[in-house]
Amino acid sequence: MRLEWWKYLGIAILLYTLLFGMLVPLGPGIVEVSPSQTNTGPGQEFEVWGYNTRFSQFEKLNVVLKLDDNHCVLAREYQVISDYRLKAIFDLPALPEGARSSEFATLIIYPAGTGTAILPSAVSLKEGDGDSSGAWVPESQFAFDRNTSLHFPYRNILMESIRNTYFHVALWFAMMFILGASMVYSIRYLRSGLLDWDLKANAYAQVGILIGCLGITTGMIWAANTWGKAWSWDIKQTMAAVAMLIYLAYFVLRSSIEDQEKRARTGAAYNIFAFATLIPLLYVVPRLVDSLHPGSGGNPAMGGEDLDNTMRLVFYPAIIGWTLLGTWVAQLTFRYLKILYLMRSRNLTEQ
Amino acid sequence: MTQIWSLIRKDWMIEWRLKYALSGLLLYLITLVFVIVISFQQISGPVWNVLYWILFLFVGMNAVLKSYQQESGQRKYYFQQLIDPVTLLISKTLYNIVLLFLAALLIYLLLSVFIESPVQHYALFLGTVAAVSVSFGICLTFISIVANQAAESATLAVIIGFPVLLPVLITGVRMSAFTIGMSMGGEIEGDFTILFAIDLLLLGLSLWLFPFLWKD
């Protein structure tokens, strides 16, 4: 028996994903700022609620409102109520030239814990009539250190559920790889006519669909907590369900053809066709329609700052881990199918 | 080329002589339109749009999915000796595309007899119908061939047909929503490009895969 090291590697990676993905804390974040709308002018008071923040640990906090790179303002004074709550008073200068009648400002607090706490579009500022004593300063005056220790980024709405990236997104990536492998085996079957390739294609398709169902389930658990409903007929959910239907039809097709050769040929042809339709289904159509899913409609998702380097440390291994585990299960399924096939053909010859 | 043309003519002659297929299709269509008009009474633009495509889906599946059935059995062996599988597939697909396009126009005419049609840009609507007919023709022809390999081909065709057609159908609904004056965001040209890309992908695949299904 050859040493199949990659199986152990897969398990190790998944253990690492589970441990690292669940245990690394979230960075500090700002949950809410009240009031969320105000006029410019002196003495504007805000109350801030933080998440994973340790306001009272630091001697000096910098509480900054930022319009853009050249327009920031530091709080005149602040009062820490608890680790998770503070009050800040700003002298807001008049909105800069060329600004719209109301502008969204980002609230930045540093140091806030293990890094900087940021809330984009925290406050909507309107031109007030109060005389401004403060002045805008460029962002380069402040030294925001964005990453001081190991933590996952805090994102509004997502919050702790950002860890689902490793158990939902990674699963879907793995599903695409496994189904792709199934398609490759189908092509090899059509090229060579060896029945083994067809059995392999079948096994990989089965495992791919299993992984897809797991991916949908983790997505639904996530949706139940962030969207409030497990299934809300979002376009991505619908398309994912349709993708599952296409592959279920593949199994129906296989089981409805008696002749082994014919079943293999038809199954292979449909499998290739199904994988090709998966691409518009999962990657083109959802782009056309509005979606609640992270990555569309201004919702945070992969790319940009949302998938930061700490998350990459877990996310990419997670994809590899799930794919390796899927391959292992697919190999076992293939052997099972092969034994079934051999037993059936032996029975036939004995009769 | 002449082979393709004569195969298309043969299909049409059979269809025309066996009147039941065409008249059955027509009757099916008229019944569906009647049921819809009677039960809905008043139909707004968006509802009209969705109903139109659902009608098209059902009528189209009925029209095309049986198209390969006549090619099984004895006649199949005869064809296998005479012609190249690619020729047969192209002729079938072309025939089905034209059939679907005519069916789509007929649905539109019948619907507009009973209900005022909300379509504002006729040329765009015609283009949409033509583009979706092409995609449906390619998809459904291939599906009917795959389903015909199995014993329970009619049921199977529906099972594997619906999910495969869904992306095309959604794009079609979106595109015709433009033509009745609803804005869905984005440009209609993009949708045409997407449909065209899907068409190319599926056509290439079915041309490649059909010879494998063809030989026994």
Image (cartoon, rainbow, N blue to C red):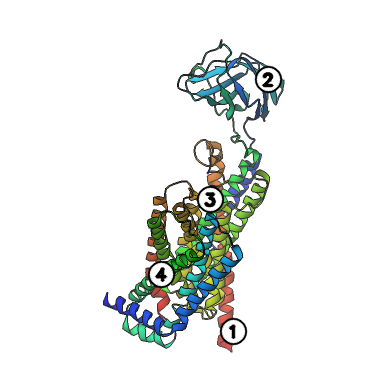
Residues marked 1 and 2, same chain: yes
Against A25, residue A208 (above or below) is below
Residue that label 3 marks: A320
Which chain does the numbered disc 2 sit on?
A
Residue that label 2 marks: A87
Circle 4 Cα neighbour tier, 10 Å, few/some/many (<14 / 14–19 / ≥20)? some
Circle 3 Cα neighbour tier, 10 Å, few/some/many (<14 / 14–19 / ≥20)? many
Please tell me whether mark 4 sits on a helix, a strand or a loop.
helix
What percent of the width, then of the height, locates residue A182? 49, 63
The mark nearer the N terminus, 2 or 3, is 2
Quadrant for the C terminus of chain A, please.
bottom right
Q: Nearer the viewer, residue A240 or B69?
A: B69
Q: Nearer the viewer, residue A105 or A125?
A: A125
Which chain does the numbered disc 4 sit on?
B
**Side (left or right) of A301 relative to B4:** right
Question: In the displayed image of the protein, which residue is found farthest to the bottom?
Answer: A351
Against A53, residue B211 (above or below) is below
Q: Which mark is residue B102?
A: 4
Q: Nearer the viewer, residue A202 or B106?
A: B106
The mark nearer the N terminus, 3 or 1, is 3
What percent of the width, then of the height, locates residue A214? 62, 56
Residue that label 1 marks: A347
